[in-house]
Image: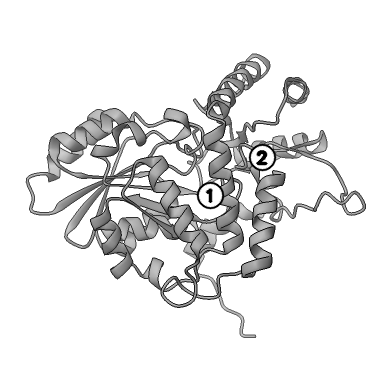
Amino acid sequence: MNKVKIPKNRLRKLETFTLGHKPYELQSLNPEKVKKNLIDLCSNDYFGLSRDNDVLKASYEISLSEGLGSGGSRFITGSRPIHQLLETQLAEWLNQEKVLLFPSGFQANIAAVQSLADRNSIVIADKLIHNSLLVGVKASGSKLVRFVHNDLKDLENKILKFNSTQKSILIIVESLYSMEGSIAPLKEIAGICKKYNVKLLVDEAHALGILGHEGKGLSFDVSDEITMLTGTFGKSFGSGGAFIACNSIIGEYLIQTSGAFRYTTALSPALSAGALKSLQKIKNNKKWGIDLLISSEKWKKEIIRNISYPVKGDSQILSIIVGQEKKAILLQKHLEKNGFLAIAIRPPTVPVNKSRIRLTIRRDLNLEILENFTSVLKAFK
């Protein structure tokens, strides 16, 4: 194989990856294979549904009858009754006219942006939106403008700056930001978008199942002002894949024009069935999200009480801001040595000198685990 030289300017971007571990390879729960048991404080499986017996059973049973994979795109052999059922029940739950499934959240976000913006558009996006949304903006050919994270005044000023042009404007935010754990003032953002008659796209990936009325996300209470929302099954639903929710007109436009929807293998029946069972469990356990947020607040208070580092997060996502990359990696290793899996997040994912340990609080983490964790944190020098 020919050796390809990487340009020096790109090597600089890759330097940070030499500081850490190789990607984690998590073993199964087979005791003969497990080298070390670690308490998971970093996965997005907030309700533990990826190992729920009912969810696993639903995935297993449909795999036996329909196979593991869907075998093609939704326009060839990929469409199955389970897809239609999941889309219909999601649309009803979220009070949306149309829901379309995608194999991944990254794919759904790209499709969402491309359906709402083109080279004649201005996209005004929160400074901290996910990389998939930025890729979508680039693919759409639109002009990107950033506003200060969760700053309503800066958002309105940016809209006023471009509102006199002939270009259409799309605002992009997340309801819950995955690295900060911060929650968007979505009601106010939706009000501004309505005031200036601009489109609003909301990524609900980390909020669904937890935030908002009965865990329906923050978009639910302002759904009339939101043009489109995206969500994923890979987090609180404990499955895989994602979706876009919108009105029927935009939904039909996506079906007819979105390459990300038309030209990809459809979401597997197993993941779809698992997601549907998880949706039913979340609907039947409306307090799960509230209880998780209460638990997370306890974690935050105890962590702050035991360490000197700043702790960010108003949700089930908490970030211990360590600062230097090497310090964050040392803390990660210290936690691992003492039985906790919590990953250091470093540039370019977060700003320079803002490296952190990102914690995700899950439903099955009890107070004993919290006490042990804070004791281990306190011992870090």
Give percent across and percent down for residue 213: 42, 28
State the SS at label 1: loop
Sequence-first tag of 2 and 1: 2
Circle 2 sits on which residue?
48
Left or right of residue 10: residue 136: left
268 w.r.t. 228: above or below: below
Q: Residue at x 45, y 38 (%)?
A: 177
Q: Residue furthest right?
A: 32
210 w.r.t. 143: above or below: above
Task: Report the front residue among 246 and 166.
Answer: 246
Q: Residue at x 65, y 37 (%)?
A: 328
Give percent across and percent down for residue 128: 40, 41
Q: Residue at x 62, y 37 (%)?
A: 47
104 w.r.t. 286: above or below: below
Q: Quadrant of the N terminus?
A: bottom right
Give percent across and percent down for residue 134: 37, 54
Circle 1 sits on which residue?
233
- Its colouring scheme is one colour
Task: Report the front residue among 297 and 17.
Answer: 297
- Res 107 → quadrant: bottom left
Left or right of residue 325: residue 188: left
Disc number for residue 122 = none
Q: Amino acid at mark 1?
A: Phe
Q: Residues within 10 Å of mark 1 (few under 14, many from 20)?
A: many
State the SS at label 2: loop
State yes or no: discs 2 and 1 in contact (Cβ < 8 Å): no
Q: Quadrant of the C terminus?
A: top right
Left or right of residue 190: residue 166: left
Q: Amino acid at mark 2?
A: Gly
Let me know if residue 36 appears in the view: yes
- Res 161 → quadrant: top left
Give percent across and percent down for residue 307: 66, 19
